[in-house]
Amino acid sequence: VAMAPGGASRKSAGRARSALIVAVSSYASDNVSNLANTIIDAAKLQGALFKLGWSVEMALELGLEQAEKKVEEFAGRGAKGDDDCLFAFVGHGVELNGRNYLVAADSKFDAAYESEAKFEKAVKRGCLPFDDVQGDFKNARGSSAGATVFLLDCCRSGFSTNVGSGRSVAGCFTSRAADSSAIRPEFPNSIVIYSTTSGKVASDG
């Protein structure tokens, strides 16, 4: 489901500001817990940005393929030139070896995994790599002077046989230290804002 209230792109100080908020609250897999507050939080962010002069597009309950297409389409359309743009994700997330993955509405997970390698394979097969999101924006931005903001309101925890909490997938994630040395496709005039630190969970509420 996609919504784009606010009409045409709004401008502030002569520079357009466009935002895409992707929020997932309902998951198809029985082993991924639904989230009560993601849509509420996304709507609050949308309202705050709109008051600041941003044109905001909301994309809700997207599957992996839908999310990939939406991010690519928005980056190509909203991240051109020297305008400012923002991408926000609200939902389940996981961090593997310092890299973040966004859990789509149709991401599939087993109730438990006998090894971390099998869990990582499931994550990489069914989740949206945040590196890919950044890459789409980097390719669209080029040498743009506009600001690019990424906001991730999701867990950054990893594999565990223990039951997780908050915005992590129950039964799969734990709060633990993570390797933050991995190289990320960051680019000039961009910033990433996280709701929690590496290896930690984010509260749903």
Image: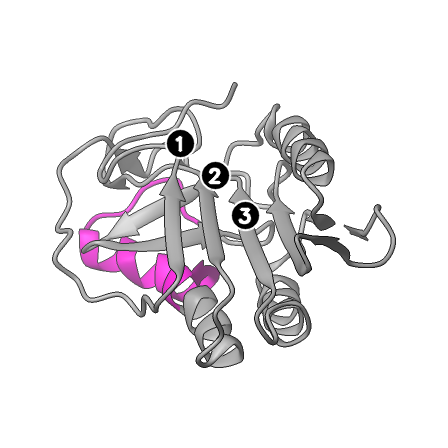
Q: Are dots 2 and 3 in contact, CB under 8 Å?
A: no
Which residue corresponds to the image point at 52% horizontal and 39% vertical from the top-left?
A: 91
Number of marks: 3
**Percent position (x, y) of residue 173?**
30, 37
Q: Callout 1, which amino acid?
A: Ala
- Say few, some or many: other residues with alpha carbon within 10 Å of mark 1 (under 14 / 14 to 19 / 20 or more): many
**Percent position (x, y) of residue 99?**
27, 57
Residue behind mark 3? 88
Horizontal side, residue 202 vs residue 34: left or right:
left
State the extent of the magenta-drawn residues as a range: 109-131
Residue behind mark 2? 31
Which residue corresponds to the image point at 63% horizontal and 34% vertical from the top-left?
A: 45
- Along the polypeptide, which appears first: circle 2 or circle 1? 2
Q: Nearer the viewer, residue 106 or 66?
A: 66
- Say few, some or many: other residues with alpha carbon within 10 Å of mark 2 (under 14 / 14 to 19 / 20 or more): some
Q: Was residue 95 drawn as part of the magenta stretch in this picture?
A: no
- Along the polypeptide, which appears first: circle 1 or circle 3? 3
> What label sits on residue 170 in the rendered view?
1
Q: Give the image's coloring scheme.
A: one colour
Q: Are dots 2 and 1 in contact, CB under 8 Å?
A: yes
